[in-house]
Image: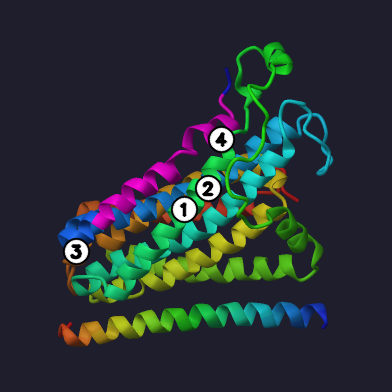
Amino acid sequence: MNINLAHLHLLINHFPTIGFIVGLGLFVFAVIGKSDELKRASLVIFVGIALMTIPTYMSGSAAQEMICMVAQKSPNAPCANPNVSREVIETHRDAALLALVFMEITGAAAWLGLWQFRRSSRPSNTTLLTVLLLSIVTLAVVSNAANLGGPIRHPEILSDPEAAATSQPAGPQTPTGVRLGLDSGGLGKFILGVPWMWPVCETLHFIGLSLLMGVVLLIDLRMLGVMRNVSFATLHRLLPWGILGFAVNVLTGMMFFIAAPEQYTQNGAFHWKMAFVLIAGANALYFTMFDETWSLGPGDDAPLTAKFAAVSALFLWVAIMYCGSMLPFLGNAF
Amino acid sequence: MPLGLAVVLLVLGVTAVVGVVGYLIDRSAARNDRREGR
């Protein structure tokens, strides 16, 4: 059996909910027990889950195409398989988009907390309170999205295609959760329909990329021996600018995806791009919080681990830019 | 509103928001650095 993005969605769609329960539980214990180590661990979980939620949402769009639009390409036509309800899928998709928005905001706040831990020994109480409140709201929203996804049947993953085509539903496919979500169908139409929206997102995507690459190059080149008279603590202060660039690119990139998911879900160059983005996110966490780089003063040579992280970051970000540029040439975008 | 002007205004607006957020975070970091004598 070939593994496709619908399988991937079924595999990773539990990460956001389960991961957030673990992260929030740990965070509450850490705050009550006043444990800085547990606080850092829970913040890392929040950032990691926020990154994982991006491919979870995107693979969900691919799964929607596979189980609903296999025979009819019209956006408003009922699903080709009569046992699959388009309404249930779209309700889940819209709730998932709202969950994604909250998840990314919580992830950004958690990253700021991690950065403050390194910068000034401990994060500000405002940051911790913000993370706590956001994570509670996010858990509620993501649980609702997961609940709405529960009734969606996946006959396409059965090993026998004939049995899949003739299988009867186990029960009526009706949404069982609260219908709370963004209208991603309406948002997609807005992005495609308003003539200035796509060029605005495209311009901001490149501004975000410049901001991010500027910081990445400075830090990685210092690790590799350029500008030896600069301490890492000085460069560490620039990290929030790089993360702001990344946030702009996640926001604008999601706009593109929501407007035309079919350009990306079956696009090999985009799959590679997203895989590289996830690894680069882990790489950014290394430079945010680990000790090897923090002890580097002016004139110090970076340890081998930091040099390896720097080389891999340079490779990853160049690969991300290459895959992004090649979307129409290696893949089927535009 | 002409298309070009709408694009320029929105891009400048979002860039300004990013700039202000970055500046506020950096100012808070500078205050902490001074306090810790870094």
Q: What's the distance in space between the residues labelled 4 and 3, CA to CA?
A: 53 Å
Which range of residues does the magenta coloring cover?
A3-28
Q: What's the distance in space between the residues labelled 2 and 4, CA to CA?
A: 10 Å
Q: Which mark is residue A144?
A: 2
Mark 3 or mark 1: which comes first in sequence? 1
Mark 2 or mark 4: which comes first in sequence? 2
Is residue A302 visible in this depiction of the protein? no
Q: Secondary structure under badge 2?
A: helix
Under mark 3, the amino acid is Asp
Q: What's the distance in space between the residues labelled 2 and 3, CA to CA?
A: 50 Å
Label 3: chain? A
Name the residue beneath numbered marker 4. A150
Name the residue beneath numbered marker 3. A301
Task: Identify the colour scheme used.
Answer: rainbow
Label 2: chain? A
Left or right of A254 on screen, residue A39: left
Classify A59 as above or below A130. Answer: above
Near-viewer residue (A210 or A106): A106
Q: Residues within 10 Å of mark 1 (few under 14, many from 20)?
A: some
Quarter holding the N terminus of chain B? Answer: bottom right
Label 1: chain? A
